[in-house]
Amino acid sequence: MSHLYISKFQSEEGKDLYGLFYDDAYGKKCPYNENWKHVAFATDKEANEKLKLIEDERKREDEAEPFSDEDARKFAENYKWKFATTYAKTAPHEYLVKLWLPDEDQIFYERFVASMKKNSVVGYFYGHENKYFILGNYYYWFMGQHDNMAVDLINRTTVDNLEYRDGAYYYKGKHEEKTYEVLRAEEEWQRAGAYSVRVQGMNRQYHIPLREEFDEHDCDGTKYIVLLDDGYPVATCRFYKISDKVVILGRLVVLPEYRGRGLGVKVLEEAEAWIKELDYSEIKIDSRVNAKGFYEKAGFNQIDDTVIKSGDFDCIKMHKII
């Protein structure tokens, strides 16, 4: 995982500040937030004091003594876990946040994390590798943290959601044979669904400024595909014409928790069907380099070897004749 570090920057008001940052999987420098706000200070000393607190907490966690299974079970039963309503249909689970505990109990949280690390087994959640701690009727896991940060949130769900095969545990999932409502969005309320997915899947996840994510092509005339899960927008793309026979397709986004289920393919197929009905014959895209294989499977070909910078992403031009 990435490492938290301090970097000097200028605020929108032109003031010099010292903030905590990390580099994401694409090497992009991202602000570290707490309570949806960038952690930043007027002086380097304050920033270093904050970073030291974070790193000291991680050190305590690393040095914590794991519980016995019996004591770990008592810890888990001693606190109220919150049900994750957002994932009720697709990945039902509960979670416990460290800050909910009294200060004097947080050492026990750290000991529980130490138990999870010591006794974890390999597992997979929709294709993503995880480490599961199986205890009684539950299994527990936490998401990847910055490597100088302590775990601040633990998830759990019941073991009947797991199956063991090929030497590892797999989350069964709740989306088998699931159908999604498809919107060909032209009205404003429908377009709002597309914007919602992009805010969550791009603006928040990759810290792309709104003024970059939403451009001059987000306007009347641009058409959007939106996939809904029980009324909740989960995937989208857009396209707009650049000539009588050619459209540009882009902003294909699937919410993080819905990835790995083929929804990107569904969105692309629906967009292509609509484009054909509108009598266009060519689709052009600017694909991220690491998404080239996805579009090749859909029949797109790379136009040339030119690599284009789109924000912080390296992109290539591809097209498909339909």
Image: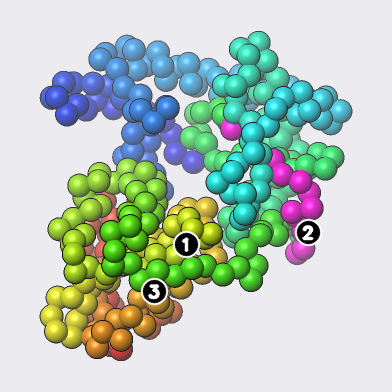
Residue picked out by circle 3 = 268
Callout in the foreground (2, 3): 3
Q: Residue furthest right?
A: 70
Q: Is residue 197 left or right of residue 127?
A: left
Secondary-structure class at tag 1: strand
Can residue 305 be seen in the rendering of this structure? no
Q: Which residues are magenta?
A: 153-166
The mark closer to the camera, 1 or 3, is 1
Quick one: label 2 or label 3, which is nearer the N terminus?
Answer: 2
Using a 10 Å C-alpha cutoff, classify the residue at mark 2 as few (fewer than 14 neighbours), some (14 to 19) or many (20 or more): few
Residue 163 colored in magenta in the image: yes
Query: Could you tell me which secondary element the residue under label 3 belongs to?
Result: helix
Report crowding for label 1: few under 14, some 14 to 19, many 20 or more residues within 10 A (C-alpha): some
Q: Which mark is residue 228?
A: 1
Q: Are marks 2 and 3 in contact (CB under 8 Å)?
A: no
Can residue 35 be seen at all in this image of the molecule? Answer: yes
- Whichever of callouts 1 and 2 sits on the residue coming sooner in the sequence is 2
Q: Quadrant of residue 290?
A: bottom left
Residue occupying the point 25% across, 15% down:
42
